[in-house]
Amino acid sequence: MHLSRRGFVTGLASAVGYAGLRPGNLLAAPVAAAKKAASDVSAIITAAAKKRMVEYDGMAKMSSNENPWGPLPSVMDAMNYAWKYANRYGYPDGGLVEAIADHHKVKPENILLGAGSGEILDVMALAFLQGNKKVLGVEPTYSTVYQRASQIKAEAIKLPLNKDYSQSIPAFIEAANKHASEIGFIYLCNPNNPTGLIVSKAEVKQLLDGIPKDMPVMIDEAYHHFVQDPNYGPSADYVIEGRPVVIARTFSKIFGIAAMRLGYAVAPPALIQKMKPYSMSSINSIVKWGAVAGLADTAGQKRMLDMTIKNRDKAIAEVKALGYEVLPTETNFYMVGIRREVQPVIDEFKKRGVAVGRPFPPMTQHLRVSVGTDQETARFIAAFKEIFPATPRTTAGA
Ligand code: PLP
């Protein structure tokens, strides 16, 4: 089953498919590192697994809005500490639910944990779309709720974005009132993925004041840590007011533990109780300790925010200097208007070892790019210049 080390590495070099790359370019170092890492574990994983690992490790990963630098050190330290409970059931968990409740100034009964906020979104759809109810949201947005809805044969009412790609609050209010009896809940992603645009604090209030009082609203705040616009505000206060609002949060972004799978909901107890039967309650002990440490580590969060904003704004400035528009993002990703269909462009980036975001219909002439490390950013810009060569200036008389 196992290849020799040499055979494995040589085989991978061709299998990975970086043939189009020139020697000495930015890709060589990461691919070499990936091959070394794979050869280090070559005795314990299959050839197929190694191939996937080298391919994955060699890519500049700018497709999934992760934290490219990895977990906050404080989070890793706490998780390492918690290994001592890995062999136990009924272990201490660091008081995560209480820590989250304190963080939002709510009670533990306002909190539901999920294996990622993706699970919270799933649970929301399962709990609130029974009996042919519909979810109301925009398109494009983060599509987990719509996917889950379609799996359970529930429908979605999808509103178009405004011309400037913002979400139309008047359109939400109109549709919510018009279809009031059909709607199970509203999904508002704020900031929105894939656009990176926010809905302001005033607009959130306008929305909540304008819809039927008992209509549940899920506000997905996965990227709230990155927002710098003073007009934005997190919405947990509406939970304290007792409005039927469910806030979804994640530890996958600024805390850098996407693969550890932890997110949560903040909502009035009645809504939490309605969601609970659909949740799997399968959070591991180690990530809970990491999350408690991460919440307390505001300096670490700030450091990560600064690194993110620095690399994001640098990349955006370079793309703009090449003549391309970028939407005004408040997140760890940005959308570039590329003036051509995006799928072939995604393929071109992939050939150059750069993973970028998938297409987000109907915005099929926009490319979503996640913030990367310095090296990933350099690789993205180098690939961008190759894929979008500058058009030569026409000289007089030419
Ligand atoms: N919500 C939004 C808007 C996202 O972009 C993502 C992931 O990228 C999630 C939720 C789910 O994140 P996770 O399940 O890792 O918490």
Image (tube, rainbow, N blue to C red):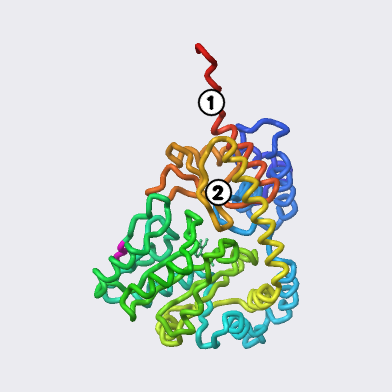
* Amino acid type at mark 1: Thr
Where residue 179 appears, as percent x and y from the top left, is 25, 69
Disc 1 residue: CB within 8 Å of ligand 1? no
Q: Secondary structure at mark 2?
A: strand
Question: Toward which corner of the image does residue 187 lie, by quadrant?
Answer: bottom left
Residue at 57% from the left image edge and 52% from the top image edge = 370
The reply, left or right, for residue 13 in relation to residue 390 is: right
Q: Which residue is mark 2?
A: 369
Crowd class of label 1 (few under 14; some 14 to 19; many from 20; radius 10 Å): few
* Rendered view: 398 above or below 37: above
Q: Nearer the viewer, residue 146 or 33?
A: 146
Residue at 68% from the left image edge and 79% from the top image edge = 86
Q: Which residues are magenta?
A: 153-157
* Rendered view: 386 above or below 271: above
* Rendered view: 19 above or below 397: below
Where residue 67 appears, as percent x and y from the top left, is 63, 59
Mark 2 or 1: the one toward you: 1
